[in-house]
C-alpha cells in the first residue's frame, strides 16, 4: 500500500511495509485516505478505458478495431508502469544529499521549475555500485525559461554524487579542452587503456539528452572506471570535488604514453588535452636567510591551491601566493629559516584555482571556512588577462556534509560576446543566470574557480 506525506509543498509517494503500524496511521489520517482513493479511482478509470483487465478473473473481449485503438492509446504494458506515469505528473523526488541543507542553497534553485520523479525496483540495481539498469524518469520542463534546451544539460544525482556532477559540468564548460578530446576520438577508440577518456566522451555526447536514465548509466560507468585507480571513489557517500577533479585530470594525463604509441600506429600524433590546456609550470626559489644559498626547482601543476583571505579578492590571494614567505628549512650552514618565492614559468589556457575553505582545528577536526571573498570576474596573471568561466561551490556549513553545485559560462556564449549568459547546474536542475549574479552569490561558498586566458602566449 501507499501513504503520502507533504514535504515543501510537494507530494512524495513512498512505498511502505504492510505492517500494522502503517495501517493504523493511514486510518487516522483522512486526508491520506482521500488521496489514495482519488488516485486509485483515476487509475481504475484509465485502465478500464484502455482495456486493461481490472479484475483477476474477468477478461474482456475486443473487436479488431478496438484492439487497434488499444495499441495506440496504451503507453505502458503493466500496472506499475502506468501507475508511475500518473504519479510522475505531480510528484517530485528531491535530488538532495542532505535535506537540512535545502534552506541554505543558492536562491537560484528556488526559481527552478523543473520537476523529476524516479521509480526504482530492487531487481534493477547492481550489488557493487547500485547502478539502476531500469530507470523511469518523468521530467516536467519549465516554460518560464527563455532557452528550453538548457534544462536538458543536468545530470541525475543518486547516492550523493553531486561532487561528481558539479565537477563534470565544470569540465564540460571548457570548450577547447572538450573539443581537443573529441577531435582524437579515433585514437582513443584504438587504445584499450583509454577507457576513462572514452567514458568522458560518452558523457559529452549525452550531455544534452533528455534521457536521464542514459545519463545516469554513463556517469556511473565513468565513476566506476575512475575508481580502478582511485578506489576511494568506488564507494557511496559524499566526496570532495577537488579530490575528484584532481584524480580525473591526473588519470587523463597519465594516459599520454599509451595513447602516443597508439596514435603512432595510425600515423597520427596525440595531444594530451590536460597538458595542452590545463597544465602550467611554476618556478620555486628557496633562499636560506643565513647563508643566502638559493635552490631553484620547477614544478608542473594542473591546479593551484590558494590560502583563503577573509574579505580579500581572488587577485589578492594569487598575489600573496607569489610573494616571499617564510618556511622552516634546515640548511647546511646550520640556519633553520628560509624564504620561498613562486612565480609562473608558463601559463595555461584554463587556470584552475582551489580556495582552501576546509582546514583543521587544533583538535584535528576539519571545519569549513565560510568567510566571504571578492570573486573577481577579471584577473591579471603575470601580465595576462584571465576571465572567470566556471565556479564550483560547496553549500553547507559542515565539512562532512553539504551539497555541490556549479555555475558556468553558457555553451552558446564566448568571452568576446557582449552578452553575459551563464548556467546554474544543481544536479538535474539547470537554469539560466548571468555572471554578475554568480559573482555576488558565490562569495561565501565558492570552492573551485576556473579562469580562461584571453590570449595565447607560450612562455613568460
Image: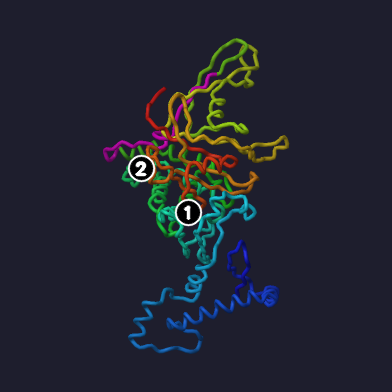
Report how far apart the C-alphas of labels 2 and 1 lie in the structure: 20 Å
Q: Position of residue 304 (x, y in %)?
A: 52, 32
Residue bounds of the magenta highlight: 264-285
Left or right side of 409 for 328: right
Q: Secondary structure at mark 2?
A: helix
Above or below, comparing residue 207 to residue 283 in the picture: below
Closer to us: 338 or 138: 138
Q: Position of residue 215 (x, y in %)?
A: 44, 56
The residue that disc 1 covers is 155
Characterize the local packing of mark 1: few (<14), some (14-19) or many (20 or more) Cα atoms within 10 angstroms: many
Q: Residue furthest right?
A: 363
Closer to us: 222 or 313: 313
Q: Quadrant of residue 15?
A: bottom right
The residue that disc 2 covers is 179
Membership of 282 in magenta stretch: yes
Point 43% across, 75% down: residue: 77
Residue 95 visible? The answer is yes
Point 46% across, 76% down: residue: 78
Mark toward the start of the polypeptide (2 vs 1): 1
Q: Quadrant of residue 37?
A: bottom right
Amino acid at each position: 500500500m501507499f501513504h503520502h506525506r507533504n514535504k515543501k509543498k510537494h507530494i512524495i509517494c513512498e512505498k511502505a511495509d504492510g505492517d500494522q503500524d502503517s495501517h493504523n496511521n493511514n486510518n487516522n489520517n483522512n486526508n491520506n485516505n482521500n488521496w489514495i482513493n482519488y488516485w486509485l479511482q483515476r487509475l481504475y478509470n484509465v485502465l478500464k478505458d484502455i482495456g486493461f483487465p481490472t479484475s483477476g478473473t474477468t477478461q474482456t473481449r475486443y473487436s479488431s478495431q478496438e484492439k487497434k485503438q488499444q495499441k495506440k492509446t496504451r503507453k505502458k504494458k503493466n500496472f506499475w508502469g502506468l501507475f508511475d506515469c500518473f504519479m510522475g505528473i505531480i510528484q517530485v523526488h528531491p535530488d538532495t544529499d542532505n535535506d537540512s541543507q535545502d534552506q541554505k542553497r543558492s536562491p537560484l534553485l528556488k526559481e527552478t521549475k523543473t520537476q523529476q520523479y524516479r521509480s526504482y525496483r530492487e531487481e534493477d540495481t547492481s550489488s557493487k555500485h547500485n547502478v539502476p539498469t531500469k530507470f523511469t524518469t518523468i521530467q516536467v520542463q519549465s516554460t518560464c525559461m527563455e532557452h528550453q534546451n538548457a534544462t536538458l544539460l543536468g545530470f541525475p544525482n543518486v547516492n550523493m554524487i553531486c561532487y561528481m556532477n558539479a565537477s563534470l559540468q565544470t569540465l564540460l564548460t571548457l570548450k577547447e579542452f572538450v573539443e581537443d578530446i573529441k577531435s582524437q576520438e579515433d585514437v582513443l577508440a584504438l587504445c584499450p587503456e583509454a577507457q576513462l577518456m572514452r567514458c568522458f566522451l560518452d558523457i559529452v555526447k549525452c550531455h544534452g539528452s533528455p534521457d536521464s536514465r542514459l545519463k545516469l548509466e554513463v556517469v556511473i560507468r565513468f565513476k566506476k572506471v575512475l575508481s580502478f585507480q582511485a578506489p576511494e571513489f568506488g564507494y557511496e557517500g559524499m566526496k570532495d570535488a577537488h579530490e575528484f577533479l584532481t584524480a580525473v585530470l591526473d588519470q587523463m594525463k597519465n594516459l599520454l604514453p599509451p595513447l602516443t604509441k597508439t596514435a603512432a600506429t595510425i600515423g597520427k600524433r596525440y595531444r594530451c588535452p590536460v597538458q595542452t590546456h590545463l597544465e602550467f609550470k611554476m618556478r620555486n626559489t628557496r633562499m636560506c636567510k643565513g647563508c643566502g644559498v638559493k635552490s631553484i626547482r620547477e614544478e608542473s601543476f594542473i591546479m593551484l591551491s590558494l590560502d583563503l583571505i577573509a574579505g580579500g579578492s581572488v587577485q589578492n590571494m594569487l598575489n600573496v601566493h607569489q610573494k616571499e614567505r617564510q618556511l622552516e628549512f634546515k640548511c647546511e650552514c646550520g640556519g633553520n629559516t628560509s624564504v620561498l618565492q613562486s612565480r609562473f614559468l608558463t601559463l595555461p589556457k584554463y587556470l584552475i584555482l582551489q580556495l582552501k575553505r576546509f582546514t583543521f582545528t587544533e583538535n584535528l577536526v576539519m571545519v569549513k571556512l565560510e568567510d566571504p571573498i571578492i570573486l573577481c570576474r577579471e584577473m591579471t596573471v603575470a601580465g595576462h588577462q584571465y576571465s572567470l568561466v566556471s565556479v564550483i561551490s560547496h553549500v553547507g556549513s559542515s565539512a562532512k556534509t553539504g551539497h555541490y553545485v556549479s555555475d558556468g559560462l553558457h555553451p552558446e556564449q564566448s568571452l568576446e560576446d557582449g552578452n553575459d549568459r551563464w548556467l546554474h547546474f544543481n544536479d538535474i536542475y539547470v537554469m539560466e543566470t548571468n555572471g554578475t549574479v554568480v559573482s555576488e552569490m558565490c562569495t561565501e561558498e565558492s570552492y573551485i574557480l576556473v579562469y580562461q586566458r584571453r590570449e595565447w602566449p607560450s612562455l613568460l
